[in-house]
Amino acid sequence: MATTTNTVRLHRVLRCPPERLYRAFTQPGAFERWLPPFGFVGKVDKMDAVVGGSWHMSFTNFGSGSSHSFGGKYLELVPGQRIAYEATFDGGMLPGTMKTTVVLTAVSCGTDMSVVQEGIPAMIPVEMCYLGWQESLVALAQLVEPDIPG
């Protein structure tokens, strides 16, 4: 039987406390700041960061102006430790539901972060998912690592 979905696994160690990373996933302004890959602008129009709560956002291609939207619900939220949420694309653009699980572990120099995204539609090349996540994680580090007083 052919695989109809893909999974990506990512790992980073970031120079910040787990609580700061957790906030980057659960505050609308932060999420739209770092999640879109390079060349896209993100806009969160709904975020109810509680288990069972829903979220919704769009990515707009800065060059062409075209956009796509997606959203889902929160499956697990353990402050500073674990986040799991699902996402589906609006309008039947791509089939199925993706699940993203983020595990945060405090380490001596900050936070060890593991991300698993499952259920990625087969028509999205897995290497494009990795590329997009790599860009998003650069922006995430730029947001969470600075330790600015005040």
Image: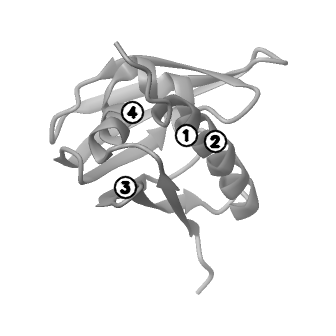
Question: Could you tell me which quadrant the N terminus lies in?
Answer: bottom right
The residue identified by callout 1 is: 141
Give whichever of discs 4 and 2 has the lower sequence position: 4
* Disc 1 + disc 2, Cβ < 8 Å: yes
The residue identified by callout 4 is: 24
Asked whether, in this view, residue 3 is left or right of residue 135, the answer is left
Q: CA distance from mark 4 to mark 1?
A: 10 Å
The label on residue 138 is 2
Q: Position of residue 138 (x, y in %)?
A: 64, 41
Residue drawn at (53%, 37%) of the image: 140
Which amino acid lies under the numbered mark 2 shown in the image of this protein?
A: Val
Question: Number of labelled discs?
Answer: 4
Q: Crowding at label 4, few (<14), some or many (≥20) Cα neighbours within 10 Å?
A: many
Q: CA distance from mark 4 to mark 3?
A: 12 Å
Which amino acid lies under the numbered mark 1 shown in the image of this protein?
A: Ala
Question: Could you tell me which quadrant the C terminus lies in?
Answer: top left
Residue drawn at (76%, 27%) of the image: 39
The label on residue 102 is 3
Which amino acid lies under the numbered mark 4 shown in the image of this protein?
A: Ala
Q: Position of residue 79 (x, y in %)?
A: 18, 44
Q: CA distance from mark 3 to mark 2?
A: 16 Å
Which amino acid lies under the numbered mark 3 shown in the image of this protein?
A: Val
Asked whether, in this view, residue 49 is left or right of residue 86, the answer is left
Give whichever of discs 3 and 2 has the lower sequence position: 3
Give whichever of discs 3 and 1 has the lower sequence position: 3
Residue drawn at (15%, 42%) of the image: 51
Q: Position of residue 64 (x, y in %)?
A: 83, 18
Give SS at disc 3.
Answer: strand
Give whichever of discs 4 and 3 has the lower sequence position: 4
